[in-house]
Amino acid sequence: MTKPFNPGTPKGCERIAYAVGFQENATYSDVYGGGGAVVGLDCHLIRPVDQPSDTLIVFMHPVGGGMYLPMVRELAKKGHHVLWANSRYRGADYALIMEKVACDLGEAICDARDRMGYTNIVLAGWSGGGSLMMWYQALAEAGQGISDTAAGDPYVVDAERLPPANAVMMLAAHVSRHRIFTEWIDPSITDEAKPEVRDRDLNLYDPDNPNQPTYTTEFLTTFADAQVARNRRITAWVREKLTRIRASENPWGEFAFTVHGTMADPRWLDPDVEPSDRQPGTCYLGDPEIVNDGPVGLARFCTLRSWLSQWSIDDARCDAIASGSRISVPVLVVGNSADDACTPSHTTRLFESVTHEKKQLHIVKGATHYYSGADGARHLAEASGVIGEFMQGL
């Protein structure tokens, strides 16, 4: 019998679930319910009972609901006030617009500041939330707000609704959704209309492929170039399709499509590619060959405008690498040496993207993406301890 999992609320803490609601002038609804103009953000505040604080750690992931993540509960247990704010797209990213996610994060912070009195905000970017926090902070410090989406649609967010934070933490994070997606996409699919037909010499899962681990440098270069090329072919098709829709009698129409083959990263199969402590032959979602065409792959189901905002290597804007030099506040980067999702090169690139000296890097030796396994509790304690020290120094 499987042992039941009860994430609960840490002893001595309270969990307050609430919604942040606001209206915007939307042409159409890209989330279920709300009528297009009403946005509701599902939020969980976890904090110690009878321990007031003016400092709040704010988590948000573009799509993931992480209010019961071990790290969230552990930080509250250690005495921190922690907010997990879900974006409007929780659980479904097929129509997700990153510019709207940045708006959601700003609204959650404004509510925490204006209604609950938190004056010191520390952004915590877990996994895919890392690039979101970096990009948000860069936007906030620039003080220019948002005027449109990556697809070129008007979308206005006033700068005053994007208040800057006092510090940023990137925890088990990757550099951006569009970069990691391109590192994972299967380049053996050369015709999106025939995804079952695959180029043998680029198919990592074809036993007849002459390129087998340990992969040569030449093959890895060819493979990576083909991944970028496939991303750009999809983008070209998306732009052509969107142009035709905009020229039609229904210019705000959309088009949904499926992207097959999205978990083909040589790192999963060859431990000599970016060596680390992770287990070869697996990724955070399981067997990468199964995940490659499974139902929960990145960008598996998509829409035109969302592709340009989330996944296009040349158009998506939410990028930690591009944002790092535009951030002035203290930054903490915590990586895990056995991370089976956000591999060590992402941790390194995140840290190096920040150009000021008020930054810290810590690697938790042996830790996986979710601090699972026999040593998970110890890894979690180490990471949360580093975060606590960083918070004390602010």
Image (cartoon, helix red, strand yellow):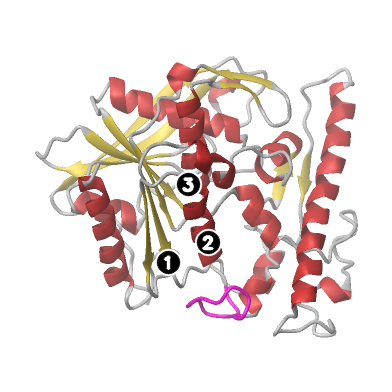
> In this image, 321 relative to 52: left or right?
right
Q: Amino acid at mark 2?
A: Cys
> In this image, 327 relative to 117: left or right?
right
Q: Which residue is mark 3?
A: 354
Q: Amino acid at mark 3?
A: Val
Determine the secondary structure under disc 1: strand
> Closest to the observer: 20 or 389?
389
Q: Position of residue 5 (x, y in %)?
A: 33, 64
Q: Which residues are magenta?
A: 271-282
Nearer the N terminus, badge 1 or badge 3?
1
Q: Which residue is mark 2?
A: 342
Q: Quadrant of residue 291?
A: bottom right
Q: Is residue 151 shown in magenta?
A: no
Q: Quadrant of residue 372?
A: bottom left
Q: Which residue is mark 1?
A: 336
Crowding at label 1, few (<14), some or many (≥20) Cα neighbours within 10 Å? Answer: many
Nearer the N terminus, badge 3 or badge 2?
2
> Are circles 1 and 2 on residues that touch, CB within 8 Å?
yes
Q: Quadrant of residue 42?
A: top left
> Label 1 vs label 3: CA separation?
19 Å
